[in-house]
């Protein structure tokens, strides 16, 4: 490892780190992480549960019938929209718009279309025709002297147009969605993680929304925000020299360590139930009902299972009489191999946070999915695994990935309290060995960077986990601007 200077040590200590932390990071950057070993695909009817309509309604009623329930909707919204507009930036850079004909033709379908044309000084109804027209449109949309969408948080992008006077941002759609399933006693709590460099802009936007939507929906919205903690940032090394990457002023470069860092933010939320959903997975009101039904299903499953598990866990404090029942319950619901496990072992197994994860049928979307994973001790557990965590040079592992039937849409309902009502320290349930070494560039040079164990992957590795099938209609992410022209995002 390249020696650290006294200035380096002062700098890393100012970030709450030690030289020991840097040695650990260097080893991870140099050697990477061991791949996750898939034992088998999670199967529908076995590890992935499907509920018929009568069961769905029963679980929904279970959730809605609980009095004085504390709920929070947790929405990771730290990202900028720059990747969403990647193709538009590339067209501007090349001054070549041949591949964007559909975008210019469909401008009227975008919620921001009318404002964009007006700000670019195009008469209403007129479309850009020449390259100069198209360049002007893209510059107006993306650059700071225009609408600055290229540097805006994704949550502040206008997603849906209800009328000439009502266009909703992604943030705004999360308010309307939360009112339908996460409001109890006419109060809805939402926690957004937001970009540090845009904090003031985002909070001004949210402040403007909160009072207006509260009056319109007769729901009191309590909004909280946080930023990804700077102390979770990680260093990087150059790929060829394995020396530390530094900024222009010679300081060690630290980069945000992926969504796994948000386990620190999540750990500060104390609630009976936490709903987790990404900022860009929202639809207009006319298409929200399926999402609402299945969010309530997941919450009802969590509540029902948790009640039964807590009763068994409490009984174990008074002796081993319910040990057999506890083993059967944990085996049935969490796919745990508990044969021969002692009462103390069962208590330890039951004293973990719970996540109920919606899973959609795999239709070729990139990203992670539900698997049964084998750990280094030979045990197995239910895990959400990302493609980057798998050894694709192993033909068996690659085949398991290819034949996975379901996909992770980031549709989670979490229980973070134990049977005594005490909130878990979620940082104690991470698997530090499931981080990821990723290839990036810095100043045109290839580097290795680190991402912490993913929020719903390694950061929740040692949770009790349930997989539930949910309809593909609940998954409508906006990864590129063109997704907004899909039928799912048309009012």
Image (cartoon, rainbow, N blue to C red):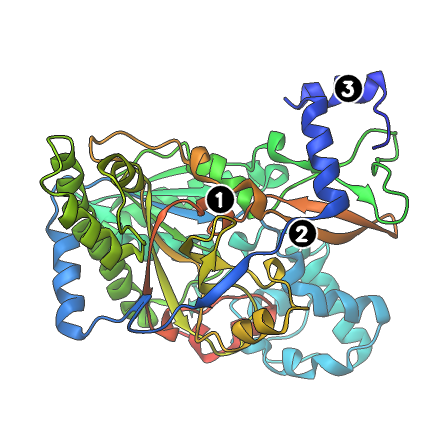
**Residue located beneath label 2 in the image:** 151
Badge 3 or badge 2: first in the primary sequence: 3
Residue 459 badge: 1
Residue 302 place in picture, x, y as percent: 24, 52
Mark 3 and mark 2: Cα distance apart in space? 33 Å
Say few, some or many: other residues with alpha carbon within 10 Å of mark 3 (under 14 / 14 to 19 / 20 or more): some
- Secondary structure under badge 3? helix
Identity of the residue drawn at 61% across and 29% down = 231
Q: Nearer the viewer, residue 451 or 34?
A: 34
Badge 1 or badge 3: first in the primary sequence: 3
Task: Name the image quarter holding the C terminus.
Answer: bottom left
Mark 1 and mark 3: Cα distance apart in space? 28 Å
Residue 375 place in picture, x, y as percent: 49, 52
Q: Of circles 1 and 2, which is in front?
A: 1
**Residue located beneath label 3 in the image:** 9
Q: Is residue 9 left or right of residue 195?
A: right
Residue 389 seen anywhere in this rendered image of the structure: yes
Badge 1 or badge 2: first in the primary sequence: 2
Q: Nearer the viewer, residue 75 or 39?
A: 39
Q: Of circles 3 and 2, which is in front?
A: 3
Residue 197 place in picture, x, y as percent: 64, 38
Disc 1 + disc 3, Cβ < 8 Å: no
Q: Is residue 188 left or right of residue 381?
A: left
- Figure check: 8 above or below 1: above
- Secondary structure under badge 2? helix
Q: Is residue 187 left or right of residue 176?
A: left
- Residue 335's quadrant in the figure? bottom left
Task: Name the image quarter holding the N terminus.
Answer: top right
Q: Is residue 81 left or right of residue 487?
A: right
């Amino acid at each position: 490892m390249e020696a650290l200077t006294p200035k380096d040590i002062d700098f890393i200590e100012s970030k709450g780190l030690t030289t020991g932390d840097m040695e650990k990071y260097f080893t991870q950057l140099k050697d990477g992480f061991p791949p996750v070993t898939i034992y088998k695909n999670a199967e529908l009817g076995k590890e992935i549960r499907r509920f018929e309509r009568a069961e769905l309604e029963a679980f929904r009623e279970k959730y809605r019938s609980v009095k004085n329930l504390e709920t929070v909707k947790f929405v990771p919204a730290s990202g900028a929209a720059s990747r969403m507009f990647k193709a538009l930036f590339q067209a501007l850079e090349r001054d070549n718009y041949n591949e964007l004909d559909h975008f210019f033709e469909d401008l009227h379908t975008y919620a921001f279309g009318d404002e964009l044309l007006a700000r670019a000084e195009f008469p209403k109804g007129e479309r850009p025709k020449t390259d100069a027209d198209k360049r002007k449109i893209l510059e107006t949309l993306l650059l700071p002297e225009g609408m600055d969408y290229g540097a805006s948080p994704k949550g502040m992008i206008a997603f849906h147009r209800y009328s000439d006077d009502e266009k909703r941002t992604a943030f705004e759609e999360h308010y309307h969605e939360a009112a339908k399933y996460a409001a109890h006693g006419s109060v809805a709590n939402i926690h957004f993680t937001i970009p540090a460099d845009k904090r003031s802009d985002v909070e001004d936007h949210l402040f403007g929304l909160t009072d207006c939507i509260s009056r319109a929906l007769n729901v009191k919205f309590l909004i909280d925000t946080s930023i990804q903690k700077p102390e979770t940032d990680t260093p990087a090394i150059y790929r060829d020299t394995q020396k530390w990457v530094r900024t222009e002023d010679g300081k060690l470069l630290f980069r945000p360590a992926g969504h796994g860092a948000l386990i620190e933010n999540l750990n500060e939320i104390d609630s009976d139930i936490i709903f987790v959903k990404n900022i860009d997975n929202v639809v207009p009101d006319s298409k929200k009902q399926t999402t609402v039904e299945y969010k309530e299903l997941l919450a009802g499953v969590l509540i029902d299972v948790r009640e039964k598990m807590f009763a068994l866990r409490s009984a174990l404090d008074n002796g081993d009489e319910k040990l057999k029942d506890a083993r059967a319950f944990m085996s049935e619901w969490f796919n745990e191999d508990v044969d021969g496990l002692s009462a103390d072992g069962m208590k330890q197994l039951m004293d973990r946070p719970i996540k109920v994860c919606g899973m959609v049928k795999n239709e070729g979307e990139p990203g992670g999915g539900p698997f049964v994973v084998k750990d280094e001790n030979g045990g197995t557990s239910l895990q959400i695994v990302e493609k980057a965590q798998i050894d694709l040079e192993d033909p068996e592992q690659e085949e398991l990935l290819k034949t996975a039937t379901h996909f992770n849409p980031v549709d989670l309902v979490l229980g973070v309290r134990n049977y005594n009502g005490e909130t878990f320290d979620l940082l104690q349930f991470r698997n530090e060995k499931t981080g990821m070494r990723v290839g990036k560039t810095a100043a045109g040079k290839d580097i290795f960077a680190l991402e912490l164990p993913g929020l719903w992957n390694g950061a929740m590795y040692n949770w009790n986990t349930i997989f539930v099938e949910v309809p593909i209609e609940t998954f409508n992410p906006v990864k590129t601007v063109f997704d907004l022209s899909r039928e799912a995002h048309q009012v």
